[in-house]
Amino acid sequence: MISLLQGEILLVAIVTSIACVMPGAFLVLRGVAMMSDAISHAILLGIVSMFLWVQKLESPLLIIGALCAGLLTVICTEMIIVSKRLKKDAAIGLIFPLFFSIGVILITRYGRNIHLDVDMVLLGELAFVPFNRLVLWGTDCGPYALWVVGATLIMNALFIKFFYKELLITTFDETYALFAGFSPIFFYYCLMIMTSITAVATFDAVGSIMVVALMITPCAAAYLLTDRVPALLGLSVVIAVLSSVFGYFFAFYMDVSIAGSIASMTGVFFVGALIKSVVLNKLA
């Protein structure tokens, strides 16, 4: 049996994993999976910059700053891609280290005496999630992080539900999308906004490493097992949830980082999917 606190940690991990794979599936299908890595690292610059302005870690402006940094990353990357001087992977690899390194420099220079450091941004600390409670009118409503990632999950699910057809068409056939009256650029940026919001909402609890792992690896594993988008979304959710559960219990019994264990477990499932995919191809 697990305790209430352990259950809350596990629940936050599961909800986070489902929230992450929703935009992650379309990032993988579009061939821009590493954009999640770029955004999740670049938001550090937005957070630090906004903190230096308002001098309050609790300010909601930090979230706005993070979102702006994420969108700026996407815009700058797209400008380089459109110039046709560099390919997508090179453009992403150029922009996000620049923004992330500037954020690191600002933290080490001006943030030495505050509770904001690079390790927490990268790794997070799920074990501390139950101690930050949401209290409304004297009533304990549970971990604050659970409400944040839960709201993000609902937002992502609603976006995909109402714009599934548009996302599908603009992902696979931009020319047809234009003839059908859908703007590929508009829905691309909508997807990037969803990715940025998800990264901002989840990084405080789980860190950017786990965010990237959950956005990319379960979806990449599912991509090896199916060529149907609905099945890919379903398999991605299953793999992400199983990674969270097994990763949590591995971390608990081995006394290691929870986020690191969950991220590593996604890699284990990917290897399993890769082996199964190779075996099925040989049998076929």
Image: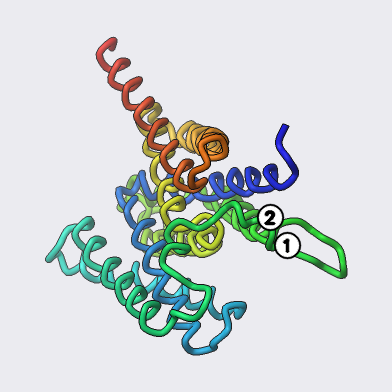
Badge 1: how crowded within 10 Å, few (<14), some, or many (20+)? some
Q: Are marks 1 and 2 in contact (CB under 8 Å)?
A: yes
The circle drawn on residue 130 is 2
Most extreme residue toward the left is 85
Q: Residue at x 53, y 77 (%)?
A: 62
Tag 1: amino acid: Arg
Q: Which mark is residue 133?
A: 1
Task: Tell me which residue sits at (38%, 36%) in the image.
Answer: 267
Q: Quadrant of the C terminus?
A: top left
Q: Position of residue 102 (x, y in %)?
A: 31, 77
User: Would residue 166 appear left or right of 227 to someone viewing this image?
Assistant: right
Q: Is residue 104 left or right of residue 1?
A: left
Task: From the top left corner, tell me how far across and down residue 124 is, in percent.
Answer: 50, 58
Q: Specify whether residue 236 is in view.
A: yes
Callout 2 amino acid: Pro
* Residue 147 rendering spot, x and y as whole percentages: 68, 58
Q: Tell me the SS state at disc 1.
A: strand
**Residue 81 appears left or right of 219:** left
Q: Which residue is more in the foreground, 20 or 85?
A: 20
